[in-house]
Image: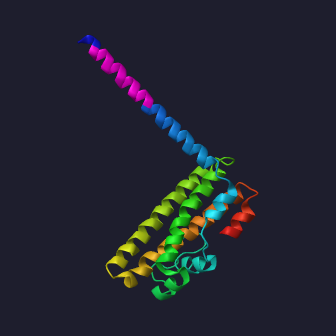
Amino acid sequence: MGDSRTVVFAVSIAAFLVSMAAIAVRSYRRGRRASGTDWEHLLKRLQVVNHNSVAEVALDIIDESGQRRRDDGSAALDSERIWELIGGLQGLEVLKANCEVLIELAFYVQQWYPDALVVAEQLRLSAREIEWNVDRLNGANRTGKLKSAFAMYAQPAVAAYYLMTRRLLALYEQGDLPMLPDLRRAL
């Protein structure tokens, strides 16, 4: 009876060690893949966005620092104009997809500039906000209420995206990184 417990214990420990080793190998490979991503590949993953339209929609409700323009929450742009400038739900999906790349661009800088971690976390929170707003719009679209919900959710999502791009540019400027001109052109 004692020998069978020892064997079960030894097998359990071996299984545990094998699973820990598998997790470590997987994490190592994932980390190497992420750090192996080169600069050009990251920039190529950014989907085309009309940056002037993004700025127009965002700066309708916030100023350059990200503060709300009007205390009453009113905006000069109506839903139809925002739809036109952003490209509707498809345009918002592009912004949502670009959020992941923006976060990766912040992590890329972390190799030389450790303070990038803080910016990357800020970008991650903004990306969640954008995802939440886009998901609300997709839900409104399924229920036939997209037109009435569009400005309420689209404009804050666009403003969050605009601020993400400004934070990323500021990070590259602070780090005085040589990739800054390329990033400016891409954003």
- Where residue 104 sits: x, y (%)? 59, 56
- Against 55, residue 175 (above or below) is above
Residue at the spot 55% in from the left edge and 45% down from the top edge: 30
Magenta extent: 4-18
Instruction: Classify residue 154 as left or right of residue 162.
Output: left
- Against 24, residue 108 (above or below) is below
- Against 168, residue 143 (above or below) is below
- Where residue 65 sits: x, y (%)? 59, 69
- Against 124, residue 157 (above or below) is below
Residue at the spot 67% in from the left edge and 49% down from the top edge: 113
Residue 18 location, quadrant: top left
Q: Is 12 covered by the magenta stretch?
A: yes
Instruction: Pick whichever, 178 or 66, lies toward us.
Output: 178
Residue at the spot 52% in from the left edge and 81% down from the top edge: 87
Quarter holding the C terminus is: bottom right
Instruction: Pick whichever, 18 or 73, lies toward us.
Output: 18
- Where residue 19 sits: x, y (%)? 43, 33
Residue at the spot 46% in from the left edge and 62% down from the top edge: 128
